[in-house]
């Protein structure tokens, strides 16, 4: 009996998921904390899917999200991998730098406080 033809045990590759990195979450949660302190946001949800990751922001838990912060790595070379999407599905801002994209939400914080 020859063992030359036996292939090593191969594990099935788990499907890749897109997720936010710790530094990205730090930036997002910093903004989230300021908006919670201002009374604008109350809850959030994070989804890591096959093609993109989503950080959803809610005013109340049972509602549809006010905003979705999306990370789509496939768009990195084009419009940018980060986007802020409004409640109606309209893309409010898209770009390559997360901090720059989130500024569209910071403006809403400045308006609500003053």
Image (tube, rainbow, N blue to C red):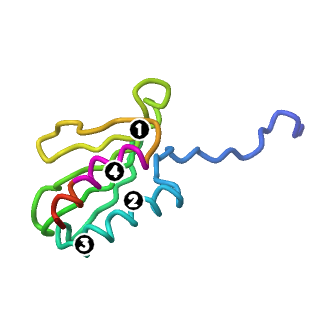
Residue 54: give x, y in percent of width and height. 33, 50
Residue at 29% in and 62% down = 45
- The answer to if 2 sits in the magenta stretch is no
Q: Quadrant where the C terminus lies? A: bottom left
Residue 74: give x, y in percent of width and height. 45, 31
Residue that badge 1 annotates: 72
Residue 65: give x, y in percent of width and height. 17, 56
Question: Which secondary structure, mark 4?
Answer: strand
Who comes first in sequence, dot 4 or dot 3? 3
Residue at 47% in and 63% down = 26
Residue that badge 3 annotates: 36
Q: What is the spatial separation of the Cα atoms under label 1 and label 2, in whole angstroms? A: 16 Å
Residue at 28% in and 47% down = 104
Who comes first in sequence, dot 2 or dot 4? 2
Please determine whether, in this image, residue 74 is positioned above or below residue 99. above
Q: Residue furthest top?
A: 78
Left or right: residue 103 compared with residue 67: right
Q: What is the spatial separation of the Cα atoms under label 3 and label 1, in whole angstroms? A: 26 Å
Residue that badge 4 annotates: 54
Q: Nearer the viewer, mark 2 or mark 4?
A: 2
Crowd tier of the residue under label 4, counting other residues whose Cα lies within 10 Å: few below 14, some 14–19, many 20 or above: many
Q: Quadrant of residue 72?
A: top left
Q: Nearer the viewer, mark 3 or mark 1?
A: 3
Q: Quadrant where the N terminus lies? A: top right
């Amino acid at each position: 009996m020859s063992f030359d033809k036996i292939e090593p045990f191969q594990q099935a590759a788990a499907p890749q998921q897109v997720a936010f990195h710790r530094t990205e979450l730090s930036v997002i949660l910093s903004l989230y904390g300021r908006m919670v302190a201002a009374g604008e946001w109350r809850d959030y949800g994070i989804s890591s899917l096959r093609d993109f990751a989503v950080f959803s922001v809610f005013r109340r838990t049972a509602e549809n999200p006010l905003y979705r912060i999306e990370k789509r790595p496939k768009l990195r070379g084009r419009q940018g991998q980060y986007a802020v999407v409004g409640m109606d599905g309209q893309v409010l801002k898209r770009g390559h730098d997360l901090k720059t994209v989130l500024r569209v939400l910071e403006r809403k914080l400045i308006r609500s406080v003053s």
